Amino acid sequence: MDRELLDYTLLSQGISIVPTVPGTKVPVRGFPLIEFFDGRRRATLSELTEWLKLGYDRAAIAGRRSAGLTILDFDSEEAFRIFFDKAPQDVADETFTVKTHRGYSVWVKDLTERLAPSSMNFRPILEAELLLSHHLVSCPLNTHPSGSLYDGPLGTEVIERKDGFASAVLDRMRSLGYVTNKHGAYAKEILEGVPLGERNSAAFRYARYLLLEIKLDKLAVLNELLRWNLMNSPPLPQREIETVVRSAIKYPKQKPRVSSRSYRKILRRKIEGYASLVCFRP
């Protein structure tokens, strides 16, 4: 399937698509991303054709702006098989499935009404993440930073509607012993954003958390900060988010000024997934 046909297939299923810098999930500079996140605009097939000519990659918006698009992303085939207890091709025959750099992404539509975080990260215990809203997801035939291509759909072209999918994922994770119902350290900022006067400091603290505790690379941190920033009131300019990430990377690592007992508790929390409403047992 070529890119134009793939884009038409996604658009016809209600998926909202935006242009990204090749090899990343970073929106093209100057693109009105907020208008797409709040539903005021959607891409047309002619716009997608133009983006293709300009050499841009494309990303789908997870959540209700894309008919409830929900992504279950695995960093490895082993994690995929642990969760589904079946081969990737078997799942690909049921719903739209993409081969990523190291693993697979399973796309479904879940229109269940729920109060939920924007994502649930099951790392480091299981190499998987559930993307529910306010996330950009690389489309098939995009270029990964490593130079490889995202491949797909591997089976059916249909993004199956599976209401209750997010709840079923959590139930499955609980049955595997990976999930408890505690709140992550940054739940408030992730779910609600922060007001004027608090945005830069919150962005800096969050960037440091992702860099030092979750051990994300700088591109992943930038992508997450850009997503989080859309929930701020008002969002910071993209240039400022980029500056915050550069500052967080350069800022010297400091030893915590806490008691040894408190520090042990902090170390234990490093196993928790970031930007999530759930924590995971070792």
Image: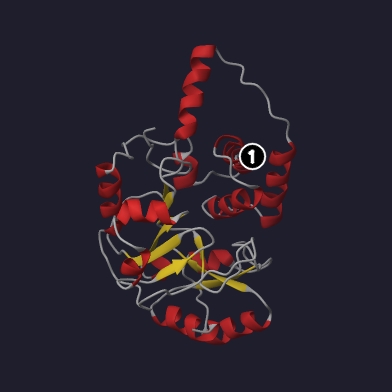
How far across and how far down the image is residue 217, in percent? 63, 47
Q: Residues within 10 Å of mark 1 (few under 14, many from 20)?
A: many
Q: Residue at x 25, y 59 (%)?
A: 164
Image vertical order of residue 73 relative to residue 203, above or below: below
Q: Which residue is mark 1?
A: 204
Q: Residue at x 32, y 73 (%)?
A: 93
Callout 1 secondary element? helix
Front residue of 111 and 148? 148
Location of residue 205 by image quarter: top right
How far across and how far down the image is residue 274, in percent? 48, 41
Q: Residue at x 40, y 51 (%)?
A: 79
Front residue of 82 and 144? 82
Front residue of 242 and 89? 89
Left or right: residue 21 compared with residue 109 = right
At label 1, the amino acid type is Phe
Image vertical order of residue 142 relative to residue 194, above or below: below
Front residue of 7 and 113? 7
Left or right: residue 272 compared with residue 144 = left
